[in-house]
Image (cartoon, rainbow, N blue to C red):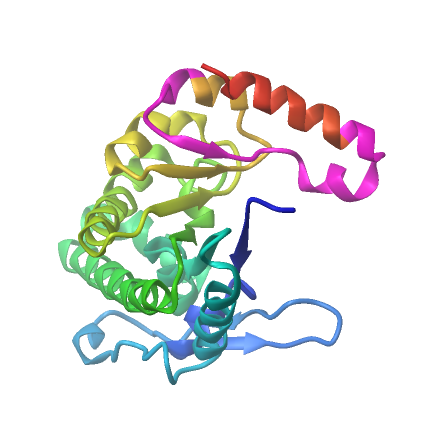
Amino acid sequence: DYDGMIMGGDTVCLAEAVGVAVHYSETEGPRWKAGCLEGYDKIDQLKLPDPMKDGGLPVWVDTVKQVAEKVGHEYLVVGRADQGAFSLASMMRGMEDFFMDIACANEDEELRQGIHGLLQFCNDCQFEFIKALKAAGAHVVTTGDSIAGPSVCSPATYAEFCLPYEKQMVERCKRIGVPYSVHICGQTEPIIPKWLEAGSPIWELDHKTDFARARELTGDRVTLIGNIDTWEMVSVQPQTVLAAAKTILHLCRP
């Protein structure tokens, strides 16, 4: 008897809908294969995806709709809005090229503006998806900006290239009346003060982030989800998982 359900298929659905090449396998989930942008000179010509037509987005939307119609009056329905702007941009450009561009942006203002143009487009893409999930019956939407944390990029990179778009999305979601949850992979403690500035009411924490410290730094400003090691959940005894869950529940008590 769960409290709610999260609907989401993979981590490249939105990327595929905007033209990123995706690899499909019979044994694993779809994965990024190749980017679709050689540069930033044609960002204004990119077309926003249609969540009701493009790629696998309609499957996600329809799944949320069916679940919401059947049990949405009784259970929390969470629609996963796939990738945040920073992660989606890295897939469109290709991660190596994207991070090289960021490294060179301090010396090339035109390049910097191109990166921000792509990030804005990616935020707009995700908002189109979020609006469709909300209309389908999702009570909450959640995104993965997986590579936005210090395990991949510096806090300074997060502050310039991630935070403004999280803030924008939080405000957009407030306007349409749906809470926005954010997941960032890895050890995120160094960016928690900045992350708080975005205003997202819900965070999904990786097991590499110390939950007690995150709770201490966020207080009652954020609902924290996580952060049991997912590998432990499939490789150890149930009582070990239960003990880990009880520890986190204890930390969350006022």
Q: Using the rendered image of the protein, determine whether residue 64 is visible from the camera's viewpoint.
A: yes
Residue 15 colored magenta?
no
| View extreme (right): residue | 237
In the foreground, 165 or 110: 165
Q: Using the rendered image of the protein, determine whether residue 20 is visible from the camera's viewpoint.
A: no
Q: Position of residue 182 (x, y in %)?
A: 40, 45
Residue at horizontal 53 percent and vertical 28 percent from the top: 209
Q: Is residue 17 left or right of residue 241?
A: left
Range of the magenta residues? 216-240
Residue at horizontal 42 percent and vertical 59 percent from the top: 83
In the foreground, 231 or 64: 64
In terms of image quadrants, where is residue 184? top left
Q: Position of residue 178 (x, y in %)?
A: 30, 52
Residue at horizontal 58 percent and vertical 23 percent from the top: 249
Q: Is residue 219 left or right of residue 26?
A: left
Q: Is residue 209 left or right of residue 177?
A: right
Q: Position of residue 174 (x, y in %)?
A: 22, 48
The quarter in which the C terminus is drawn is: top left
Residue 42 to residue 64: above or below: below
Residue at horizontal 22 percent and vertical 44 percent from the top: 167
Q: Position of residue 18 (x, y in %)?
A: 37, 76
| View extreme (bottom): residue | 53
Residue 238 colored magenta?
yes
Total number of numbered labels? 0
In the foreground, 230 or 157: 230
